[in-house]
Amino acid sequence: MLFLYSYILLKKINFFIKFHKQEQEILYPPKNVSNKKFNFKQGMKNIFFFFTIFIATNSFSQAERKFSTFLSFQINKTLSDRTITNNSAGFGFGLQTLLNTKTRIKPTLEINADLFAGTKELYQTADGKPIDSKSGTIGVYVGSVFQLTENLFLSATIGTSIFNSKAYFGVRPSIGFYPSKRKKWMAKASFTDIFQRDNISNQSFSYMSFALALKLF
């Protein structure tokens, strides 16, 4: 399963790197070369394709009794960023896998792919360097879920978020609940704080996510 996670992650990273390069060609086209239009529908098809492979493979896994996996749809609201108007809100999909234990603490792995929308204006530093906007992010986080009650839980994870061809450390605390005793659905609110540290500024990129997830197995 870890090998599969790694394979999917590499595929997603490759997709968003291509996304960023094409976006830069639109913002800063070479001389005598016409602008290229990014195929948004094809990009979303790629994301759905990788999720489909993951779901199909794990549905036949021998370890399925040891794990619970949820597929989520989430909406995001940016709280802070160096160019907040360029990435003010977004949406995405995620997978969360829990290791079923007999205790209140359950190890967890989260993989999220999000797209962000905004004005996409050109921002520059004082010395004229461009400040890139964020079109999409990929996050891989690991940590633990603490079951407060039968239906209510807290989660604390750390990991890496990737955007604009760079990886940044981040933290992602969450609170969620299961609306029914069968735990077929999950509702969750998460705060993601990405430590965006580079030669432009040290301002973090943070956002709230509100997700609704369906249990796959």
Image (cartoon, rainbow, N blue to C red):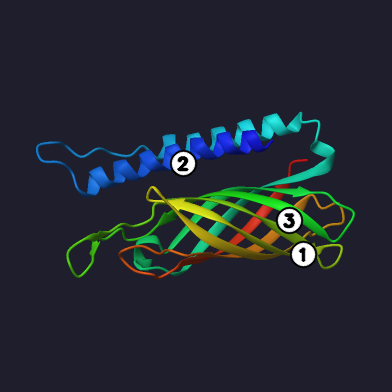
Name the outermost residue toward the left: 32
Tell me if residue 172 comes above or below residue 70 in the rendering: below
Judge depth for marks 3 and 2 and give the one in front: 2
In the image, what residue occupies the spot 36% across and 62% down? 198
Q: Nearer the viewer, residue 80 or 48?
A: 80
Quarter location, residue 43: top left
Q: Is residue 91 left or right of residue 36?
A: right
Q: Amino acid at mark 2?
A: Ile
Q: CA distance from mark 3 to mark 2?
A: 27 Å
Q: Residues within 10 Å of mark 1 (few under 14, many from 20)?
A: some
Of the numbered discs 1 and 2, the one sitting upstream in the chain is: 2
Residue identified by numbered label 2: 13
In the image, what residue occupies the spot 38% across and 70% down? 202
The quarter of the rendered structure image containing the C terminus is top right
Judge depth for marks 1 and 2 and give the one in front: 2
In the image, what residue occupies the spot 24% across and 43% down? 25
Q: Which element type, helix, strand or loop, lies under badge 3?
A: strand
Q: Which element type, helix, strand or loop, lies under badge 1?
A: strand
The disc label shown at residue 153, or none:
1
The disc label shown at residue 186, or none:
3
Of the numbered discs 1 and 3, the one sitting upstream in the chain is: 1
Tell me if residue 119 comes above or below residue 182 in the rendering: below
Of the numbered discs 3 and 2, the one sitting upstream in the chain is: 2
Q: Is residue 213 left or right of residue 163?
A: right
Residue 203 in the image: state x and y as whole percent: 40, 70
Q: Is residue 116 left or right of residue 97?
A: left
The answer to whether mark 1 and mark 2 are in CB contact below 8 A is no
